[in-house]
Image (cartoon, grey):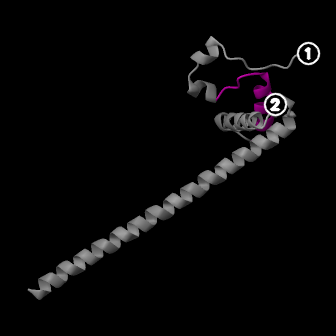
């Protein structure tokens, strides 16, 4: 038995990145998506991103993705998704803190400007 491998073909190349991003590329991905959906994950794009990121990481260290058990692949993809969510949440919090700080700085500069204008008017 030969495992199913995704091969690049004209048809898969003609799919836009957007279309390919939310559809399983092969039977293995379909199976992993189904397992993760049963676990409560609902965003296909997020699920597939996790599955593909894990597969890419495994390829980088010369571990074939097909050699990884489905359960191990799902668990690794789940951890990848959770870490991505945490990173996004942290980045959002940092952005909010920066925007808040910038707003406070701008308000302080405006107050100082108004105080100087008042002092200038009172000096006259």
Q: Which image quadrant: the N terminus?
A: top right
Question: Residue lying farthest left?
Answer: 124
Q: Quadrant of residue 16?
A: top right
Q: Position of residue 108 (x, y in %)?
A: 34, 74
Magenta stretch?
22-40
Q: Is residue 62 above or below residue 82?
A: above
Q: Report the disc number at residue 1.
A: 1
Q: Position of residue 121 (x, y in %)?
A: 12, 82
Query: Which residue is labeled 2 in the image?
Result: 64
Q: Earlier in the sequence, mark 1 or mark 2?
A: 1
Taking depth in this image into account, of 67 and 112 the one nearest to the observer is 67
User: Which dot marks residue 30?
Assistant: none
* Kind of element beneath mark 1: loop
Q: Is residue 57 above or below residue 10?
A: below
Q: Residue at x 44, y 61 (%)?
A: 99
Question: In what element is the residue under mark 2?
Answer: loop
Q: Which quadrant, please, contains the C terminus?
A: bottom left
């Amino acid at each position: 038995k030969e495992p199913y491998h995704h091969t690049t073909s004209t048809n898969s190349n003609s799919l836009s990145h957007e279309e390919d991003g939310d559809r399983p590329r092969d039977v293995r991905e379909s199976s992993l998506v189904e397992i993760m959906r049963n676990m409560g994950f609902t965003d296909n794009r997020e699920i597939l991103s996790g599955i593909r990121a894990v597969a890419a990481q495994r390829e980088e260290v010369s571990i074939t993705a097909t050699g990884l058990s489905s359960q191990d692949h799902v668990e690794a993809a789940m951890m990848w998704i959770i870490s991505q969510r945490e990173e996004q949440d942290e980045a959002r919090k940092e952005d909010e803190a920066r925007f808040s700080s910038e707003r406070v700085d701008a308000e302080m500069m405006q107050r100082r400007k108004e105080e100087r204008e008042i002092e200038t008017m009172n000096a006259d």
